[in-house]
Image (cartoon, rainbow, N blue to C red):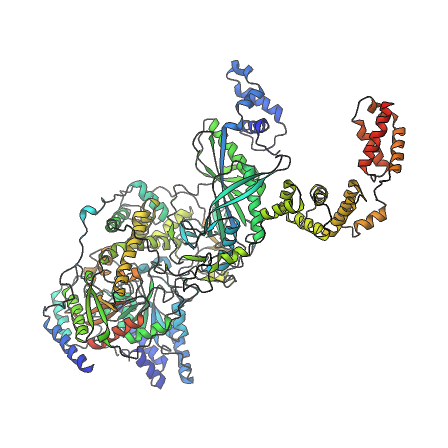
């Protein structure tokens, strides 16, 4: 084992120093083995319209319904489209690698709670024992058209 | 005034409500005058048609028969458990603000859900009682929307593959004074799912903010989604009543609607017969069984009114306002909502054991065994009713009433259990007709009244053996209800309330009454048969209501007919 | 002292040659010295000193808890630590003080380990460079001018590098605390801080997290051992999630042996995490050397992807040679769905992100702006300020894929592709392969300027290529440093084995480690 070690260390050093290109191990593929995505297989690139971005913004509330947001989104969709052409007929979705295992059930006893102080310790605004929220169910104030590059959204 | 759904009687009531579009009350006492005015107002523009529009004609044209309503209920029942669905926080109602809250319930980052076994068992028991198909594998999903009472921004529920599906609930629709007899209605259950309850918001209008209490957040709920196979508010109310009986019987839900332990949402739509289904609206915030009937009825009427006046029914969520007794639009919680259901990644699939199937190695003894639970099912209300009818021979209506009122049923069993020879029909009459009336009169309730079935049983015995008459029995019940510690037999002894059944005694009294009331006798013989009751009343008064009234009536009639014929 | 393994330092502590406080002091000093590498978000100096003192008494009294007792460690800043800020390198949680310990943290504490600090990361673990952090980027200690390496030629290489590359100043993206003249090499991500902390000898072990390679990637760039255990083996309770169905706590150490020590402390069922497996965990024992000639090593063809550097390729080949020469059977295998893994991951990742991030609204915890016109306005304002664009972009995309109309062709399709990838692995294992040998990253550590020239998504897409599939299948994977590149940066390789076969995986890893004798940094003060 030690002999082998010394031998190989020397070999590695040799190769490092020389920086030679050499023949690869036969099992290592010499060239990339990637199935190029068939361009025809891809669905047409999705363009996001005003309605969709407004819907998404309402569902996301990240103030990103602007040009930059749309660009990112369209890019993400384009990348995701790579999987749409894959043949998955007869394949069941795999939600979790633990799908064959079963859910642990705990006993019905009180083991938590009664820790209001801890639960509320990180809340920025509280009112006595309550959390505080503004009034809800008021739709977002309409933003400017999506063509504006909204600089007010944080760029870090 | 209870509204009834048949023929003209209903059309009448229905017409009134349509005419009262601006009136927000169900007060229908001044019906005739107001409706008359209204009709005049309405047809004013076209005077030539006035003649044609008589009350009856309008009512006939607007008979309800061409409108059909479709009602589907969604019921959220809080599962009775010590701790929450996914966390170990407590669940008792009315706990101080934000105390029954664990870090997970407040959606603190990094916390994870752990499922409570009791909740699964409760769900399975309920599913079995409702003849549902329990799924051997079910999955939890996240339902996403933003609201201040939902700290995680999503609710964990079971959308795609719930705990149970395809069940049915059979129930009697029967309101005394409304229906001749109960009819059986069946509503199918689409699915039964386990899910989290949300927190509570206290709206502070002045300060334009909401105060958030998360004690309720994460409390386990069973959601029961019924198919839209009901037709009116009474059916809806009856369904809820039966469901409550079952859940209370199983012990899986307290069903205290006033505490929010059971919440009913109604999906209502109307359409003309033969036409496609109409747009539905959802009615929430219904706080009692009767409110279910009222709210559904109101919404049906509102939709019909809207459509008949050329309006359009909007797909929206409305709230039942108990004060004004109408449904009002809720602030639109949804707009264009997409809940983006996604499987909950922190919870592997829930497996339950069915039909003695072999457990996969991982399960061991933790798994919920459905067959085991099935064997533990208690006698369900439907079965109780059948037993009452078959075993005791009482009527279907009585069976419905007894089962609806658990305390009454307990008394019934108490009475019959003590002495099998007691007449069940008599016993039910005493309970349903007499006892309840007296309790109402005294403004008492069954739950809080401290008397026992023994006393009631004695009264039954005394009646059955004709030792007392019905009037005396009522007196005895009154004493019992008031808390008189003496037994009924003792009271009869003490106050001398024994029934007079001696025919000669009765003869004497009747003779005396006839003699003392020649004028009434004359009137009777002249054909005014109503005065007979007065004569009977006089006999009753003299005998201090102790005479056997059936005998009295017989004797009096005999005597009077003799007089008539002579 | 700082380059010792855990076993070795533990020996010294046991023998009384050192006290835990001494070690702790040395590590704190090292941390201070290497401050510009920005590996820590926060040093928990007081906590560490208290814990070290407690360990002192334990050692004096002979109540040693285990190998880890008194050993300084660090955890990534997405592990909840009781009363210590846990920021996830995001403004959203900048002042968040959890009221509980993550199970992993608690286990370390129970073992007597000394918590030195919270390590820097990409914001919410979204990134593969540890450059997208509100605390500024972390820098690779290799070629940073902070340490020498044991191989002499690297000095000359380094000089050549400095001459060769135009030293362009780093861009304004991210706030560097000190702008050095050199364009430094990235630490990798998203557990970059943890990797540098271990590589620099500041700690003896660190916790990272691994969702698509976030532990293995920086481990590879920083020349340390990065272990991603099987999904379900370690508890995620208290680990602020990125993708719940793929996240695993990651272990970073300088040797495979140390990784085993950590694993033995951390693994096991946790009733607070329903995604941990309930099988009893049998602690690994690698005391017996394995017989490498009995092993079957698989070389998946598809892992040679475009962009892979010649050096990585050579390294891959060399180790394959070494194994073959030792008698192992090295076999070419095919895992045809490998190229789809990244795109599939992008969908699942973004969907989970959209969901997991929904809780950040400022009401119960975290950043809260002064906006109070409505709940919606408050949420939007808080979230746009608290999250960087990467996070926000992923939320939008995730919600897009989860829309009812898109659910089937994106989310469900991705789950199906996930099964295909997992089936690739299953097929390999059932054909008798013991471990797979692949590259970890496509190149050695990139320079910062080069790294930020491509956007976050592109970076992840290429850098995560070889590491991501293991997360899809949930199988354990470990990266070990093999040799140095021409630039004098570490080159590493990855091994993967069947789920829950960490014993086999790490035994083979250890064998390779001993053979290649990677030239570690000189760490002692």
Which quadrant of the view contains residue B12?
top right
B254 and B41: which is toward the camera: B254
Asked whether residue A61 is in view, the answer is yes
Query: Residue C205 location, x and y as percent?
Result: 31, 73
Quarter in which the C terminus of chain C is drawn = bottom left
Which quadrant of the view contains residue B560?
top right
Please, is residue C471 above or below residue C266 in the view? Answer: above
The residue most toward the top is B48
Please, is residue C288 above or below residue C232 in the view? Answer: below
Asked whether residue C370 is in view, the answer is no
Query: Residue B92 location, x and y as percent?
Result: 55, 56
Please, is residue B544 above or below residue C280 in the view? Answer: above
Quarter in which the N terminus of chain C is drawn = bottom left
Number of on-image labels? 0
B546 and B345: which is toward the camera: B546
Please, is residue B201 above or below residue C115 in the view? Answer: above
User: In the image, what residue occupies the spot 57% across and 32% down?
Assistant: B5
Query: Residue B508 location, x and y as percent?
Result: 90, 35
Q: Is residue C244 left or right of residue B357?
A: left
C382 and B215: which is toward the camera: B215
Q: Is residue C15 left or right of residue A71?
A: right
Query: Residue C361 location, x and y as percent?
Result: 40, 53
């Amino acid at each position: 084992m030690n002999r082998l070690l010394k031998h190989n260390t020397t070999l590695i050093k040799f190769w490092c120093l020389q920086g030679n290109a050499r023949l690869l191990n036969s099992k290592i593929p010499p060239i990339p083995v990637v199935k190029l995505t068939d361009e025809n297989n891809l669905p047409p690139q999705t363009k996001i319209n005003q309605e969709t971005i407004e819907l998404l913004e309402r569902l996301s509330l990240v103030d990103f319904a602007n040009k930059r947001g749309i660009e990112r989104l369209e890019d993400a969709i384009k990348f995701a489209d790579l999987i749409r052409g894959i043949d998955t007929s007869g394949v069941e979705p795999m939600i979790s690698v633990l799908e064959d295992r079963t859910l642990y059930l705990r006993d019905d006893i009180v083991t938590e709670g009664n820790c209001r102080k801890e639960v509320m310790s990180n809340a920025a605004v509280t009112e006595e024992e309550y959390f505080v929220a503004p009034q809800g169910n008021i739709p977002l104030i309409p933003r400017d058209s999506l063509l504006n590059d909204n600089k007010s959204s944080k760029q870090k | 005034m209870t509204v009834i759904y048949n023929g003209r009687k209903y059309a009448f009531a229905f017409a009134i409500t349509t005419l009262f579009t601006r009136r927000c009350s169900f007060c229908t006492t001044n019906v005739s005058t107001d409706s008359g005015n209204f009709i005049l107002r309405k047809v004013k523009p076209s005077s030539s048609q006035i003649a044609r529009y008589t009350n009856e004609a309008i009512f006939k044209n607007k008979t309800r028969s061409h409108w059909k309503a479709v009602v589907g209920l969604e019921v959220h029942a809080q599962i009775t458990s010590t701790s929450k669905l996914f966390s170990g926080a407590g669940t008792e109602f009315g706990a101080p603000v934000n105390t029954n809250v664990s870090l997970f319930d407040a959606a603190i980052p990094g916390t994870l859900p752990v499922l409570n076994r009791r909740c699964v068992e409760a769900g399975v028991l309920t599913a079995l009682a409702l003849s549902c198909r329990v799924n051997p594998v079910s999955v939890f999903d996240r339902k996403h929307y933003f609201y201040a009472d939902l700290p995680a921004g999503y609710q964990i529920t079971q959308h795609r593959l719930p705990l149970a599906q395809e069940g049915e609930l059979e129930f009697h629709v029967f309101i005394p004074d409304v229906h001749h007899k109960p009819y059986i209605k069946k509503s199918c259950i689409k699915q039964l799912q386990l899910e989290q309850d949300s927190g509570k918001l206290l709206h502070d209008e002045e300060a334009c903010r909401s105060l958030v209490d998360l004690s309720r957040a994460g409390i386990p709920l069973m959601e029961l989604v019924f198919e839209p196979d009901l037709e009116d508010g009474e059916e809806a109310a009856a369904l809820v009543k039966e469901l409550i009986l079952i859940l209370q019987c199983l012990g899986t839900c307290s069903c205290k609607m006033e505490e929010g332990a059971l919440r009913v949402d109604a999906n209502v739509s109307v359409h003309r017969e033969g036409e496609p289904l109409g747009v539905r609206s959802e009615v929430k915030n219904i706080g009692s069984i009767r409110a279910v009937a009222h709210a559904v009825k109101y919404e049906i009427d509102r939709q019909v009114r809207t459509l008949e006046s050329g309006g359009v029914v909007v797909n929206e969520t409305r709230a039942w306002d108990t004060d004004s007794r109408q449904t009002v639009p809720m602030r639109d919680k949804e707009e264009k909502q997409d809940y983006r259901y996604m499987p909950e990644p922190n919870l592997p699939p829930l497996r339950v054991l069915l039909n003695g199937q072999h457990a996969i190695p991982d399960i061991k003894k933790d798994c919920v065994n459905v067959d085991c639970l099935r064997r533990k099912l208690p006698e369900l209300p439907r079965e109780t009713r059948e037993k009452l009818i078959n075993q005791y021979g009482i009527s279907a209506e009585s069976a419905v009433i007894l089962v609806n009122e658990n305390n009454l049923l307990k008394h019934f069993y108490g009475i019959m259990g003590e002495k099998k020879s007691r007449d069940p029909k008599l016993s039910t009459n005493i309970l349903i007709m007499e006892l309840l009336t007296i309790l109402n009169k005294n403004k008492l309730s069954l739950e809080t009244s401290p008397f026992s079935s023994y006393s009631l049983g004695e009264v039954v015995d005394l009646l059955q053996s004709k030792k007392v008459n019905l009037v005396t029995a009522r007196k005895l019940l009154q004493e019992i209800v008031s808390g008189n510690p003496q037994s009924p037999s003792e009271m009869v002894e003490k106050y001398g309330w024994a029934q007079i059944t001696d025919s000669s005694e009765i003869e004497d009294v009747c003779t005396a009454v006839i003699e003392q009331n020649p004028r009434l006798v004359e009137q009777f013989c002249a054909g005014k048969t109503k005065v007979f009751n007065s004569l009977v009343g006089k006999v009753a008064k003299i005998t201090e209501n102790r005479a056997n009234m059936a005998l009295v009536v017989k004797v009096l009639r005999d005597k009077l007919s003799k007089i008539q014929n002579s | 002292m700082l380059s010792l393994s855990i076993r070795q330092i533990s020996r010294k502590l046991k023998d009384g040659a050192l006290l835990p406080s001494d070690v702790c002091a040395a590590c704190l000093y090292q941390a201070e010295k290497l401050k510009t590498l920005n590996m820590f978000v926060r040093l928990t100096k007081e906590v560490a000193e208290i814990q070290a003192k407690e360990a002192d008494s334990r050692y004096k009294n002979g109540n040693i808890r285990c190998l880890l007792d008194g050993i300084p460690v660090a955890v990534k800043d997405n592990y909840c630590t009781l009363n210590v800020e846990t920021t996830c390198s995001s403004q959203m949680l900048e002042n968040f003080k959890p009221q509980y310990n993550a199970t992993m943290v608690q286990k370390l504490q129970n073992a007597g380990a000394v918590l030195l600090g919270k390590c820097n990361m990409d914001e919410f673990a979204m990134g593969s460079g540890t450059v997208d952090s509100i605390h500024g980027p972390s820098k690779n200690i290799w070629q940073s001018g902070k340490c020498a390496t044991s191989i002499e030629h690297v000095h000359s290489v380094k000089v050549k590098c400095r001459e060769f590359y135009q030293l362009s100043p780093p861009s304004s993206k991210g706030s560097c605390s000190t702008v050095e003249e050199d364009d430094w090499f990235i630490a990798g991500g998203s557990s970059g801080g943890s990797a540098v902390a271990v590589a620099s000898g500041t700690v003896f072990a660190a916790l990272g997290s691994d969702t698509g390679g976030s532990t293995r990637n920086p481990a590879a760039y920083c020349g340390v051992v990065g272990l991603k255990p099987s999904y379900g083996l370690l508890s995620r309770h208290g680990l602020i999630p990125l993708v719940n169905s793929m996240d695993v706590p990651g272990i970073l150490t300088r040797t495979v042996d140390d990784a085993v020590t950590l694993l033995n402390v951390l693994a096991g069922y946790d009733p607070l995490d329903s995604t941990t497996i309930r099988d009893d965990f049998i602690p690994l024992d690698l005391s017996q050397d394995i017989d490498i000639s009995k092993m079957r090593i698989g070389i998946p063809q598809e892992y040679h992807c475009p962009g892979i550097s010649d050096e990585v390729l050579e390294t891959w080949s060399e180790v394959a040679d070494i194994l073959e020469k030792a008698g192992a059977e090295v076999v070419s295998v095919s895992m045809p769905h490998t190229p789809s893994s990244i795109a599939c991951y992008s969908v699942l990742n973004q969907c989970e992100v959209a969901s997991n991030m929904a809780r950040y609204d400022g009401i119960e915890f975290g950043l809260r702006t002064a906006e109070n016109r409505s709940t919606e306005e408050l949420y939007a304002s808080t979230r746009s300020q608290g999250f960087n664009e990467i996070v926000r972009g992923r939320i939008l995309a995730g919600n897009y894929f989860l829309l009812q109309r898109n659910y089937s062709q994106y989310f469900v399709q991705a789950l199906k592709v996930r099964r295909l990838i997992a089936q690739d692995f299953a097929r390999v294992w059932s054909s008798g392969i013991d471990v797979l040998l692949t590259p970890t990253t496509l190149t050695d550590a990139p320079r910062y300027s080069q790294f930020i020239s491509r956007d976050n998504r592109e970076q992840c897409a290429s850098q995560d290529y070889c590491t991501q599939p293991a997360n899809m299948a949930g199988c354990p994977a470990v990266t070990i440093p093999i040799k140095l590149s021409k630039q004098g940066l570490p080159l590493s390789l990855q091994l993967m084995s069947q789920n829950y076969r960490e014993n086999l995986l790490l035994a083979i890893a250890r064998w390779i480690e001993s053979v290649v004798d990677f030239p570690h940094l000189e760490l002692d003060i």
